[in-house]
Amino acid sequence: MVWQDLYREFITLFVVIDPIGTIPVYLYAAKSVKPELRVKFALRAVIIATCVLLGFLVVGQFVLESLGLRLGSFQVAGGIILFLFALDMIFGQSKPASEIEMFDQDLSGAVFPLAMPSIASPGAILAIVILTDNHRNSIAEQAVTAGVLLSILALTFVLLLAATRIQKVIGETGASVISRIMGLVLATVAIDAIINGLIALDLSALFGA
């Protein structure tokens, strides 16, 4: 694998995983988690996302091909999920005190929405399947891609740890504003993913137009 290919893979995976864009999602998902549990929360999210992405790296292409699934359908489904999450970020109300206490020790938010679909997004899953195409890449080349993926996920974890300090500086109001702004951005990304999926499916051909 030449350096140009390595650089292309790094940029591709960095964009689809979007470690920087994950920070507002983390602040939103972890707002009901006690400060002393934030590191565990972030670590759990990154580990789960890593397992998902490495799982698709190993067997993703085989599963999709065996089920006869089209990538366009996968993009549309992922875009809809992201859009629903974006709406919650934009219009979601603050949790009542009793509910906040109930979730103080709950780390389930590390699975959804942080690990999936924020870090291990549909775009990231698609990218890792495409970049490790079994028909074009050797096992050694796929191992290099796995190394690039792990380096970006490690960077994501570091940024999530920094996000906790950022939250202390900007406060609850600042975190709420960022959450709603990024929710709008995420909604735009979701709509774009749906449109690209529909284009890939070529619906005009399906309906005989």
Image (cartoon, rainbow, N blue to C red):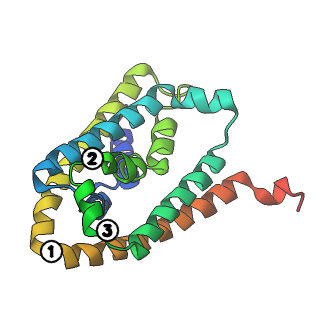
**Which corner quadrant of the image does residue 192 belong to?**
bottom right
> How far apart, in angstroms, are the residues tagged by discs 1 and 3?
17 Å
Q: Label 3 neighbourhood size at 10 Å, few (<14), some (14-19), many (20+)?
A: few
Establish if 127 lies above or below 91: above
Q: Which mark is residue 95?
A: 3
Q: Of callouts 1 and 3, which one flags the residue occurring earlier in the amino acid sequence?
A: 3
> How far apart, in angstroms, are the residues tagged by discs 2 and 3?
16 Å
Q: Of callouts 2 and 3, which one flags the residue occurring earlier in the amino acid sequence?
A: 3
- Label 2 is placed on what type of residue? Leu
- Label 1 is placed on what type of residue? Gly
Q: Horizontally, is 27 left or right of 5 in the view?
A: left
- Label 3 is placed on what type of residue? Lys
Q: Which residue is mark 1?
A: 171
Residue drawn at x 51%, y 64% as measured from the top left: 83
Residue drawn at x 61%, y 55% as measured from the top left: 76
Q: Residue 31 placed where, x, y %?
A: 23, 62
Establish if 142 lies above or below 43: above
> How far apart, in angstroms, are the residues tagged by discs 1 and 2?
21 Å
Establish if 185 lies above or below 196: below
Residue drawn at x 61%, y 33% as measured from the top left: 64
Q: Which residue is mark 2?
A: 107
Q: Residue 41 placed where, x, y %?
A: 22, 47
